[in-house]
Amino acid sequence: MKQKRFLLDESELPRQWYNIQADMVNKPLPLLNPATKEPLSADDLAHIFAAECAKQELDQIHPWIDIPEEVQERYRFYRSTPLVRAYALEEALGTPAHIYFKNESVNPLGSHKVNSAIPQCYYCKQEGVTNVTTETGAGQWGAALSYAAKTFGLECAVYQVKISMQQKPYRSSIMRTFGATVTGSPSMSTRAGKDIITADPNHPGSLGTAISEAVELATTTPNCKYTLGSVMSHVSLHQTIIGLEAEKQMAMAGEYPDTIIACFGGGSNFGGLAFPFMRHQLKGQRDDVRSTKVIDFIAAEPASCPKLTKGKFEYDFGDSAGYTPLLPMYTLGHTFKPANIHAGGLRYHGAGTIVSQLLKDGYMRGVDIPQLESFDAGLLFARTEGIIPAPESCHAIAATIREAKKCIETGEEKVILFNLSGHGLIDMTAYDSFLNGDLVNIG
Amino acid sequence: MKQKRFLLDESELPRQWYNIQADMVNKPLPLLNPATKEPLSADDLAHIFAAECAKQELDQIHPWIDIPEEVQERYRFYRSTPLVRAYALEEALGTPAHIYFKNESVNPLGSHKVNSAIPQCYYCKQEGVTNVTTETGAGQWGAALSYAAKTFGLECAVYQVKISMQQKPYRSSIMRTFGATVTGSPSMSTRAGKDIITADPNHPGSLGTAISEAVELATTTPNCKYTLGSVMSHVSLHQTIIGLEAEKQMAMAGEYPDTIIACFGGGSNFGGLAFPFMRHQLKGQRDDVRSTKVIDFIAAEPASCPKLTKGKFEYDFGDSAGYTPLLPMYTLGHTFKPANIHAGGLRYHGAGTIVSQLLKDGYMRGVDIPQLESFDAGLLFARTEGIIPAPESCHAIAATIREAKKCIETGEEKVILFNLSGHGLIDMTAYDSFLNGDLVNIG
């Protein structure tokens, strides 16, 4: 029988993250203070984030960052995640392509988000922080942070977009089960929230309102830091554990990818899988080349939120309210209102600084996936591989199917690797709508 | 760092199931035809079940049954499941005990049920069957069967208890995502269903009504077989893959269990974990003893459905309507109405034939867990090990915690192994009730 799953022994788990900034030819442009337009220092960022995260955010020197022992210990709760050969999907498509996926859905939190929640909480703990806070939409990140905070003995307060909290009550139950306090945003617990509610008592909330409340809580509470689940460079750094494992696992399978695909919201699961492979194509790393192949890196974004294919490269705010530093990135504008698609994790206007520079420099490309195509792909995947994918991950699957179908025409046995960033078990209302024929393409 | 997770290479996966009936000193008594009181033959059972399953059900000769190649192939989609050392739980309890759990929650269906759904559908396919049907309550079994049917190209019809279908809509969405037809029972699609609805238009349904409808569909539809997710001996046989893996994994950890614990509904996850270890304590297997330890086997049942501790050993029906063969087992009586606890999978009046004989002969014992104790245990487990357990599995965790606390008093470093039969992500309403203080002890 052919081997289907590839797992690493604990002794083989990566002990360092890969910092792609150090190897980039054109470095990301600096983050700017919106008032002074001056580049921000790590000290500036450390007012909000853990100091170590702030340092990692701006590190353009060190390609390898040691993973702290206690973080490695928590990673071992669920890592390595399996690299899986999708034989059944290949057969259903009739493609000569070899399709592999990295299965990040098989940790108890259900997505890759916990890979960064753990180190962020660890650094907070090390630095004497007692409370962490964040915003969350659909709740994957909030759930991951709630667990990570609990495991390091930190109090955790999550502001969840009010409308999401009502639409997906299970995710707030999960956060509460892990001991977090969950507040629907806008709330009366912050000045920002009060102002919003006073102006509009029925405001449904948005990531913008939730970020404002979380940042306010962090800056007005002693020993409290703000954390973020994507977009920032230190988050992608932590997520490189995905690609570093995948590289070893592909070697176990005796193959090397021609194409690497991940869905794209703020960039953390894409960067996490792609950057370790991409390093072989960057200057200064040529001595470390494992393959002469030039990999086709594809970020799959929703057609209704097409910042990679239709955004502009410019300085923009990270949040809709305009409270964050200015980030140099591809963006649809911070006031862009993404359509209400089920892939809540992909409803973000900007692409982050690293990916934006890499896209500008031609190392990767974006593709736009309509909502119905994403669920068609998700359903086929469920019925062949037995895993119900998160609506976000369905975008990566749809892009994979497109590439695999091209191989039917060309006859090429391309090796395609995609990231299954999470499962869809808390998103069954979305599948319900799709199965009932109620779902449409938006945007 | 100490190793936390133990996984088997694909080459080490078991290739045979273990049939404990062959090694039992006192064999289970025969199943009886309720009309004639004559023992049933495999041919009799094959009117309802796949012929191979009927044969396995009554096999008291062969201790090892080959796992078909195509079943092994499907097992490799998610097996081996991890054996995990629960260091964080141990630390929170302050116990000298070594706690291990077999994590059956990390397959895409979320519970151990798929271990039997796959072979049952495989045998149906081999025998020219085109349609399978079953009943399901909370829906773990129905979801597993829906996936397994799809992977072997069988049509699948599930009768789900109507009230459960309304209370846990996500589970029926999962079944539909895998392509099954899901009908709330009682329904107008069968004679039995029509009779029930005519008598009581608002009947909420029960496992009894759903079994009646599924059996009627199987017996009135060409090429359609009925399948079952627990209770029957062939189901426990398939589940021994759990214990056979665990035995190898405990050896990797360099330990051997003093105590083995699983929750108990119809017995399939308990038998699956326990039987392979128990074989060393049965006559004729002494030459194969891996340890001189006599293991304490504990089945954790809900206090509100205490068939193991308070039931009688007698012939009884498997369903509440009295359509099935008579089974010799510990039972609360087939008309017993279990309280409406959240652990829907444990709401069953009987213990099955093998476990009942083993209990009678003193090889194992039952303990009763009140609902609140089960959720206290589940919450502690979630907050230490990061996994939200199914309400059923919480009973095993509660029994484990009881044993671990005894070790604090005695100072014994006992090795406790329990089965985490499933995750609780589709049961968050139960955790919600518990966190809100709305949950009570029943029964």
Image (cartoon, coloured by chain):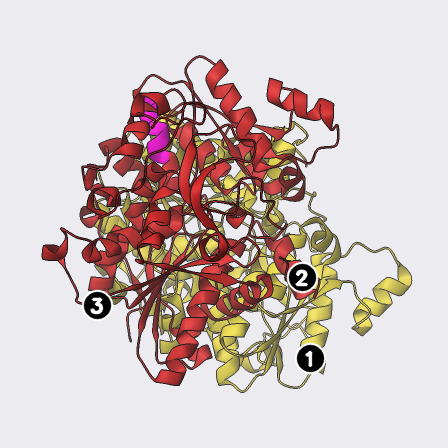
Chain colours: A red, B yellow
Q: Who's the residue at 43% across and 77% down the image?
A: A405
Gap between marks 1 and 3, in whole Å? 58 Å
- Picture coordinates of residue A387, whole percent (x, y): 48, 61
- Picture coordinates of residue A58, whole percent (x, y): 28, 33
Which label is found at residue A35?
none
Dots 1, 3 in contact, CB < 8 A: no
Which label is found at residue B219?
1
What amino acid type is highlighted by mark number 1?
Thr
In the visual, does A212 lie left or right of B159?
left
| Image: A128 above or below A306 | above
Gap between marks 2 and 3, in whole Å? 39 Å
Quadrant of the image for the N terminus of chain B?
top left
Q: Nearer the viewer, residue A341 or A3?
A: A341
Question: What is the span of residues highlighted in magenta in the rendered image?
Answer: A118-125
- Picture coordinates of residue A38, whole percent (x, y): 36, 26
Q: Nearer the viewer, residue B309 or A394?
A: A394
Type of secondary structure dominating the magenta stretch: helix
In the visual, does A216 lie left or right of A249?
right
Using the image, name the chain to which the residue with label 3 belongs.
A
Q: Nearer the viewer, residue B306 or B175?
A: B175
Q: Which quarter of the figure has residue A258?
A: bottom left
Give the mark nearest the N terminus, 2 or 3: 3
Using the image, name the chain to which the residue with label 2 belongs.
A
| Image: B217 above or below B313 | below
From the image, tell me which residue sits under label 2: A439
From the image, tell me which residue sits under label 3: A293
Circles 2 and 3 on the same chain: yes
